[in-house]
Image (cartoon, rainbow, N blue to C red):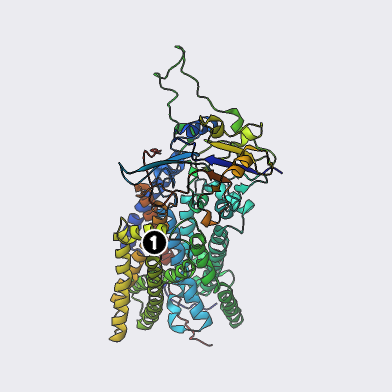
Amino acid sequence: MAQYIEQLPYEIGRPARTWRSRAGVLGAFVAVGLVAYILELTEGMGTTGLRNIGPMGGATWGLYITFVIYFVGTSFAGISVAALVRLFNIKALEPITRTAELLTVVTLMLAAMAIAADLGNPVRGILNLLIYARPQSPFFGTFTLVISGYLFASSVYLYLEMRRDAAICAGTPSKYQKLYRWLAAGYSDTPAERRRHRKAGLWLAVAIAPLLVTAHSTLGFVFGLQVGRPGWHSALQAPAFVILAGVSGVGLLAVMAWLFRNSLHERRLGDDVFGWLRNILGALLLIYLYFWVVDLVTALYQGDRAELTVTRAVLVGPYAWIYWASAACLIIPMLIIIVQKAKRSTAVAPLVVAGAMVQFAAIGKRFLIVVPSQTYGTLLPYGAGSYIPSWSEFAIAVGLIALGALMIGAYARVFPIIPLEDPRGSED
Amino acid sequence: MTRYAMAIDLDRCMGCRACMEACKVENGTPKGSFWMYVFRLEEGTYPSSKLSFLPRPCMHCDNAPCVKVCPVGARYKREDGLVATDWARCIGCRYCEVACPYGVNNFNWSDPAEADYLDWNEAELPGDGESVIPPWRNPDLDEDSRPENRPIAGGGHSAGVIEKCTFCVQRLEKGLQPACVTNCPVDAFAFGDLDDPDSEVSRKLADKPSFRLLEEAGTEPRVYYVGDKHPEAEVHQVEAVEAKV
């Protein structure tokens, strides 16, 4: 195999003091989260702010479930970009395919960890879900389609797309040479191998593209199928979950593409990449805002007392600040994108601001779906409840986000986060 | 085949909450956990207010939302109609709790042994002078229940699992009535087999018009209420039990 490059790209393997200090800070957050989780394991879930619905007047699902949905939602990015590149042959997005796939794999792992944090019996959870799984439970889809199927397929996809670059990097003497050789696993970039990989990648993209809808829908069904909680039972729940997943996933991808562009000075992460992301984010935001309005009109127009109690708590009650902040975090990004399109502006910074803002909207909106229907949605006259997350829940949520950033950062330190340009030029 | 059901006479209930007490003693439930809960409800404001009482056990629904959503089949419907919780299989996801419109599920937020009302090691506890009263736990609760031989009886088993009213399955096995039924001073409860026209519950339901809670949710509860009417939306709870852990 010919030696393609003189030095490993993207400063891989070279000392980086800023990365080390940043990793240290992230590691500290992860450590605090880990301490909180160990406390939860030893003391029981009383360390959380969660309490029973009913006489105890609490919410039994809270921040953990909010972040499970947020993390799974964010994983939308990888598969959608892969599908666009593979199925619709959009070459412009190619430089961010790996970032997107990595984002998917990492956020799905975080989602699995957030589920573990939420389970009263995490070890029994893993065993019993394998032994006794019931397809009738909406959770079945979460565990099979999302956590197993989606994560596994995305990992395979990520790996297949990595082999060529691993083979290229293995040709350069470095401390990671052995790792690259192991990852390349005999791949040497012959035309036959290339064709085989293209084919495998295409079919894998075809196979996982339906997961874009089904996997994210199953999380919507967890709530949308329940009649016992006012505010949950709605056919709009599943499609809205899919679209908001797209909004948060594509938004975060824009932020990450900007981060890597700045830190790696990569000219291939150019305006056309961000242009595509802007278009996709804009379209998804528009659909989601439409869903939002439909949902609001339905909730306000009907007379059902229980539904109205929840709606009132959300619109003008104790949850109002989250509601209106989330609304602002969707409307302002929408306006940013509309103005940018109208002015034909290709500036990246406003898009990145929009991408960051929708993250808060995605978390806030999920919290509003999960919590008020428990604290204000009791159909028997229990009275209003309350839920304030404890420090340990915040610590675990922040720790998971830090862990995700750490994993992505570490990946970028040992492997080209942007697919290498073909030194021989594209032949097909 | 037995079809267990309960009828609660709201004209008789005086809100004394003796059923809640009996349930706790029989089933050893931890602090803050109320398998039976009695609402004391007020409609309007004093002086033109009306008081009413509403005991709320688990409804043991025929179309139970909690059974449908359980991802591992720890919550299941028995042939005799009981909705049971296999606490040894429960993974603690609490999906049953959010799915239930009645709020009857109780999660063990900490080790039940530490969430008791009394600290059994405390010296001031009344005793015979030499030692404190030993903590008492109903021995029947730790045995598997027939016919499935699954651990479903009683509460306070372990941290991180869901527990709820079992209609005192350990008492039913011995031919006894649930503890709340037996302990009611005014005989507000009728319990028995719906298939037996001479059972107490059948006779009660034949006697008087009845309703079930939140029937519009389609859950088909096995708990019927006679006398009075379904609580209106205008009622609010007074003297709520402070359930804390």
Residue, disc 1: A405
Against A77, is A304 above or below?
A: above
Q: Is residue A372 at all visible to an observer of this figure?
A: yes
Which image quadrant: the C terminus of chain B? top left
Q: Which residue occupies the foreground of this view, A249 or B243?
A: B243
Residue B82, percent across and down? Answer: 62, 44
Against A169, is B130 above or below?
A: above
Residue A254, percent across and down? Answer: 37, 73
So how many labels did they put on this image? 1
Kind of residue at badge 1: Ala
Q: Which residue occupies the foreground of this view, B223 or A322?
A: B223
Give the residue displayed 59% in from the left and 42% down from the top.
B207
- Return the chain for callout 1: A
Against A411, is B34 above or below?
A: above
Q: Which residue occupies the foreground of this view, B2 or A252?
A: B2
Determine the image quadrant of residue A189.
bottom right
Q: Which residue occupies the foreground of this view, B3 or B137?
A: B3
**Does dot 1 land on a helix, a strand or a loop?**
helix
10 Å crowding of disc 1: few (<14), some (14-19), many (20+): some
Left or right: B220 as drawn, with respect to A61? right
Q: Is residue A416 at all visible to an observer of this figure?
A: no
Residue A338, percent across and down? Answer: 31, 81
Residue A410, percent across and down? Answer: 41, 62
